[in-house]
Amino acid sequence: MPDDDSTPPEPTGGGASASGSDAAADPEAPSILTHKELRAPSEGSSLTKWYVLGGAVVLLIAGGVTAVLLGGSTAATKAVPTTTTAVPVPVVTCPLTGTPAPGNVVPPRPALATKIGNFTDDRPSAGLNQADIVFEEPVEGSYTRLVAVFHCQGANLVGDLRSAREPDIAILSQLSNPLFVHAGGIDPVLNLIANAPVQDRNVLGSGLGSITIHPSGRYAPYATFTATAPVWALTPSDTSPPAPLFTFTPAPPATSVPGSGIAVHVPFSTEADVTWTWNPPRSSYLRTYSGAPDKLLDGTQTSAANVVVMTVPTFIGPWVENSGGGREVEVTATGSGPVVVLRDGVAITGTWNRASLTQPATLAATDGTPITLHPGNTWEELAPQGIPVTTTAAPPPTTPTTTVPAKRTTPTTKA
């Protein structure tokens, strides 16, 4: 018997068999296969079927898992809606006033202090209502002078500029190396300024013509003014704002008495008699000077959100200030002393304490709690010890009286 893998012999002779003839005539007719070839398609077909079936199952399972995952993801997305929560932007405040900073950014510049006269011919002044803080100090001749400090806002006209005084050193030293614009001073005071943490800008020196203004209608020595913008332009690289001097709160301390501070009287002298009166419609105090409204050059009355009256020790120093022989009034600005703060129509009495000239004074009420100021501009009055500082309270409300009509009686008549 021939082996299964042997190939049958081809037919001999020139004629083809009937099977070969049919195959030649029909190209799609199957060819004659060996037993091995006959078994191969059957085995391959069986394996192919299993491969196909297995692949189909894998595809079905994969499709089902994908559907479940996609369905679950969609369900989860629908179950948890996306929400956007707005994050509030913190309000940035000005260091010297506690009010919102312009554009929510503290101006990157130093404090700018200006020395302003307060003699009869110095007034009306300019720029005081734009200053963050104004300090009023006693000087020779029973008068006062002012130091107006600018930072968060400026002014196009400030003045008039006058000479520096000894109390200026204590005022300026707490302002984080401020610019100081003034019109000269006696040599001992100029020496104090040269050794203080101050950027001196004496307009009587050379090279400062760009920061001086001479309004028409004024005469020397009351005719020199300035503006804040050109002064700040002198030091463009100084971007350090001042440190705060006060603490601010929108509402007065809980222990304050409503209506207890509708006015305060600070009689520096008969020539410099200052009164601040609460104006509810404007929510500020208005200043009168020697019995008349203190009007500025633009026609507005001097006003302040806060009035801080610090009673300070003063003495007459050895330095002669003027041709009349008036000597320098000096102030002891460290230590402690009485203080009264007026804000929101209330008066808060207490004590000021100051450890050094480079630190501001802390203000504490009689009960020991900190005294806070209302956000806004402040006037600080440096009242010499011995001056009677008095506050006025609102009169107590009156209780309306009601009149009870007399009871009518019906006359009795005899029958």
Image: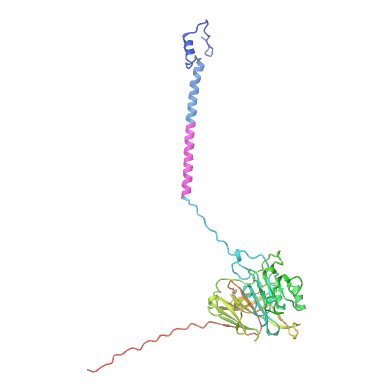
Q: Residue 102: horizontal and vertical position, in percent? A: 60, 66
Quick one: which residue is furthest to the bottom in this view? 414
Q: Give the range drawn in magenta.
A: 55-78
The answer to which quarter of the image holds residue 282 is: bottom right
The kind of secondary structure the magenta stretch mainly shows is: helix
User: Furthest-front residue in view?
Assistant: 216
Q: Compared with residue 42, is residue 290 higher up or lower down, i.e. above or below?
A: below
Q: Position of residue 324 (x, y in %)?
A: 74, 86
Does residue 33 lie above or below 345 as drawn? above
- Where is residue 357? Give x, y as percent: 70, 74
Q: Nearer the viewer, residue 79 or 1?
A: 79
Q: Quadrant of the C terminus?
A: bottom left
Residue at position x 48%, y 48% from top? 77
Q: In this view, does 309 lie to the left or right of 21?
A: right
Q: Which residue is drawn at 49% across and 20% down?
A: 41
Of residues 107 and 4, the one drawn nearer to the viewer in this rendering: 107
Residue occupying image coordinates x 49% and y 31%? 55
Q: Can residue 209 be seen in this view?
A: yes
Q: Indicate whether residue 2 is drawn in magenta.
A: no
Most extreme residue toward the left is: 415
Percent across and percent down for residue 307 are 60, 77
Residue 69, magenta (yes or no)? yes
Q: Is residue 94 left or right of residue 63?
A: right
Residue 356 seen anywhere in this rendered image of the structure: no
Q: Which of 315 and 220 is in front in this view?
A: 220
The image quarter in which residue 169 lies: bottom right
Q: Which residue lies furthest to the top in this view?
A: 13
